[in-house]
Image (tube, helix red, strand yellow):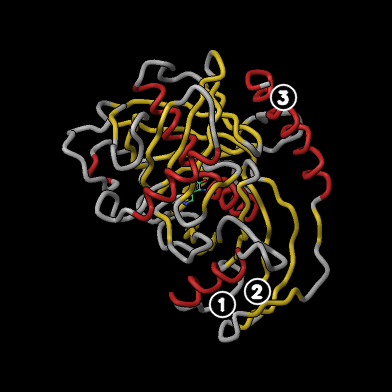
Amino acid sequence: MKIEVVKCHGSNNDFILIDEINNVYSFTEEDRKQIAILLCNRDDSLGADGILYTMPSNHADGRMRMFNPDGSEAEMCGNGLRCVGRYILEMVNKHEIIVETKEADLMVMQQEEIFEDIPSFEVSIEPVRLHPRDLPLTSEAELHIEKPIQALSKDLTFTAVAVPNPHLIAMVPEIHDENLSSIGLAANENKLLLPNGVNVSFVQPLGDNKIFVRTYERGVGLTNACGTAMSASSLTTVLLEMNRLNEEIYVYNRGGFVICIVEKYGDEYVIKLRGNATYEYKTVVEIDLTQQDMMEQTNRIWFDEERKAYEKLQFHAEQEINHVNG
Ligand SMILES: N[C@@H](CCC[C@H](N)C(=O)O)C(=O)O
């Protein structure tokens, strides 16, 4: 079958967006999974951290389903929601929309640019849950905040947050990718501890209202950035009184930066995630799922201007990280 795709990214967490609003593909559930495995494979020509199925909704402006490269479906994807949100906002010509996701209907709105010439979007990250059963994480604690998990590390402490996909957050003085990968791998293999797997992040404070976050993503591995992880990390710094409610937190990552704002309404937290939603190119692929085979059918249409503008943001982010880490 032939599929039109848009390659896009949020903080260089890259996705293949498939428009099922304007195209009728009639994918089965198994097709969605196999398409994710096939098109996200970085040994093939596209490669990505996930597929964003952009679909009609019977009550919202649109619907997002996000699949990881291993074919699993995630409850939520923060960087992906900005991309799907942008796509639908431009389609319906509005400034604010509601997008149906697996567990919640979420707001996406156009925002003032977070950096020169970077069209920027804000998404709501909710529901936010802090009980270990919500990940689920096997833990005796009522709330697992800054507590050890011996099976994963002898010296680190972790905070468990569901937004609503599952996250473990560890504050560290500096980030070592190998250590993060080995803890991420162990966490996702230990089904007694974490039956649904987990995204694991290391967070390094960079100064006032600034943090650096690296994430080992469930279903993917180490990525340049993870939007829900940066939101959960910002919340963690507020819970630990390192940052404050309602204030902008600059979250740097290997692919750029985003701004998170943690808000609280009664007992409920909501996290606002602001950042880019950059298009890289459009193309058409012919896929054969029985052969697990794909071929691009057209020359790519590149979005050169926005890619160029993004390079400056990324350079700025690298400087901020290197300023502290040398
Ligand atoms: N990169 C995403 C999260 C994607 C899903 C994640 N791997 C999971 O399985 O929970 C983001 O930007 O939030």
Q: Do the residues labelled 3 and 2 touch (CB within 8 Å)?
A: no
Tell me, for residue 319, which label it has, or none. Answer: 3
Horizontal side, residue 53 vs residue 124: left or right: right
Q: Are dots 1 and 3 in contact, CB under 8 Å?
A: no
Q: Which residue: 83% across, 49% down?
A: 304
Residue 95 in which image quadrant: top right
Q: In this view, does 271 lie above or below 59?
A: above
Vertical order, 94 against 53 (above or below) = above
Q: Does the residue labelled 3 lie within 8 Å of ligand 1?
A: no
Residue 25 in percent (x, y) is at 56, 77
Residue 97 location (% of width, % of height)? 51, 46
Alpha-carbon span between mark 3 and mark 2 = 39 Å
Per the image, the residue denoted by label 1 is 25
> What amino acid does circle 1 point to?
Tyr
Check contact, mark 2 vs mark 1: CB within 8 A: yes
Q: Please name the residue shown 34% across and 41% down the image.
A: 152
Q: How crowded is mark 1: few (under 14 residues within 10 Å), some or many (20 or more)?
A: few
